[in-house]
Image (cartoon, rainbow, N blue to C red):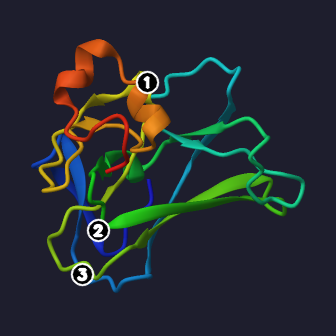
Amino acid sequence: MPHLTGLRVTHSAIHGYGVITTRRFAKGELVLEGDGVLYREDDEFDDTYALVLPGWGADGGDDPDAPSVYYDLIDQTRWINHSCDPNTEIDSRYDHERGALRAWWVATRDLEVGEELTYDYAFVGALAQPCACGAPTCRGLIVDDDPEELAAVPEELRGHLRVAAGRAA
């Protein structure tokens, strides 16, 4: 795997491993680009480290009517943990010239040396999992805060939820 410039994989206070900064990143700055294997909804694969991304149209832009795609991360980006108050966001697009999906993380605020990178996994309600991010705004579950997704959280996990299913966080 290529070296992550300005970043290091280490043990995480959130969960397992994490990626921390070894230099400062400014808000809006590209932090890193991930590499992975692209799968369609019907493909069988282990989705443990996969990003779920919207499908795209012929122009490479998001197409709300296209089925979702899964980008199984195969590099150090797989160690970026979830937070309900993330410090990065993912952008992606299909690169027709390369014939591949590109996914990259951008700082949503200034990042200081030693900060752990996080992004909001925003799982669908049916796949929600308990959250350990520790953010003051933690939803209690790794789940999209859309009211429809909150309503789809399995009954056995509802006790973890810190936002009402009828309203977004």
Q: CA distance from mark 1 to mark 2?
A: 36 Å
Q: Secondary structure at mark 1?
A: loop
**Residue under pointer 1:** 152
Of badges 1 and 2, the one in the foreground is 1
Q: Position of residue 47 (x, y in %)?
A: 49, 28
Q: Secondary structure at mark 2?
A: strand
Q: Secondary structure at mark 3?
A: loop
Q: Position of residue 105 (x, y in %)?
A: 46, 65
Q: CA distance from mark 2 to mark 3?
A: 7 Å
The residue under the point 87% across, 61% down is 59
Q: Nearer the viewer, residue 5 or 133?
A: 133
Of badges 1 and 3, the one in the foreground is 1
Amino acid identity at mark 2: Leu
- Is 51 positioned to the left or the right of 38 in the image? left
Q: Nearer the viewer, residue 35 or 145?
A: 145
**Residue under pointer 3:** 23
Q: Quadrant of residue 130?
A: top left
**Relative vertical location of residue 73 with respect to residue 141 in this rendering, above or below:** below
**Residue under pointer 2:** 7
Q: Position of residue 98 (x, y in %)?
A: 78, 60
Amino acid identity at mark 3: Arg
User: Dot 3: few (<14), some (14–19), or many (≥20) neighbours within 10 Å?
Assistant: few
Note whether residue 63 is visible.
yes
**Relative vertical location of residue 34 with respect to residue 151 in this rendering, above or below:** below
